[in-house]
Image: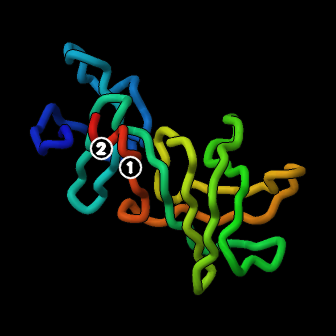
């Protein structure tokens, strides 16, 4: 289904899809290529949309492992994809082993369950990392919301 809730096709289970996936959706013939934006496991829905809707700029993390004593927000280089370059970010430590990460440039296909690692902005030293929480913990970038 698309972001407006219009059913575009049927599938054999959401386990066959991943956020950011473009190929194998069986949804050709649209104005622009469609990508998996979200997976709704409770309702067995795969939500698709244009690439511009994949960008996210803020996420909440759980089970953060700090490699220094983090008490106040700090600037970092953060990665959510191992093969992509790090992105400038502000990391805010939160109670109960959580953190909020605000990316200065949106990243595509951020999904719950992925790791986010933060590095020192000065020397690339690992400062910590955690696991991206559920879908509600990911905020789309303004460009993605307008898109």
Between 107 and 49, the one lying in front of the other is: 107
Labels 2 & 1 near each other (Cβ < 8 A): yes
Which residue is found at the position 42% from the left and 58% from the top? 138
Q: Is residue 140 above or below residue 33?
A: below
Residue named by callout 1: 140
Q: Furthest-bottom residue in view?
A: 96
Picture quarter with the C terminus: top left
Which residue is found at the position 57% from the left and 72% from the top? 62
At numbered mark 2, what does the secondary structure look like: helix, strand or loop? helix
Tell me where residue 13 appears, x and y as whole percent: 30, 45
At numbered mark 1, what does the secondary structure look like: helix, strand or loop? strand
Tell me where residue 63 appears, x and y as whole percent: 62, 74
Between 105 and 132, the one lying in front of the other is: 105
Circle 2 residues within 10 Å: few <14, some 14–19, many ≥20: few
Q: Earlier in the sequence, mark 2 or mark 1?
A: 1
Q: Is residue 39 above or below residue 113?
A: above
Side (left or right) of 26 relative to 125: left
Circle 1 residues within 10 Å: few <14, some 14–19, many ≥20: many
Residue named by callout 2: 145
Rendered image quadrant of residue 67 = bottom right
């Amino acid at each position: 289904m698309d972001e407006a809730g219009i059913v575009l096709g049927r599938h054999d289970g959401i386990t066959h899809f991943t956020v950011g996936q473009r190929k194998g959706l069986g949804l050709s013939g649209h104005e622009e290529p469609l990508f998996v934006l979200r997976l709704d496991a409770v309702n067995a829905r795969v939500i698709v949309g244009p690439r511009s809707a994949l960008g996210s700029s803020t996420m909440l993390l759980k089970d953060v492992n700090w490699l220094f004593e983090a008490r106040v927000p700090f600037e970092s280089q953060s990665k959510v994809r191992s093969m992509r370059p790090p992105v400038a970010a502000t990391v805010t430590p939160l109670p109960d082993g959580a953190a909020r990460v605000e990316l200065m440039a949106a990243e595509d296909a951020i999904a719950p369950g992925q790791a986010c690692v933060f590095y020192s902005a000065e020397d690339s030293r690992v400062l910590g990392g955690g696991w991206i929480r559920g879908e509600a913990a990911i905020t789309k970038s303004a460009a993605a919301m307008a898109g």
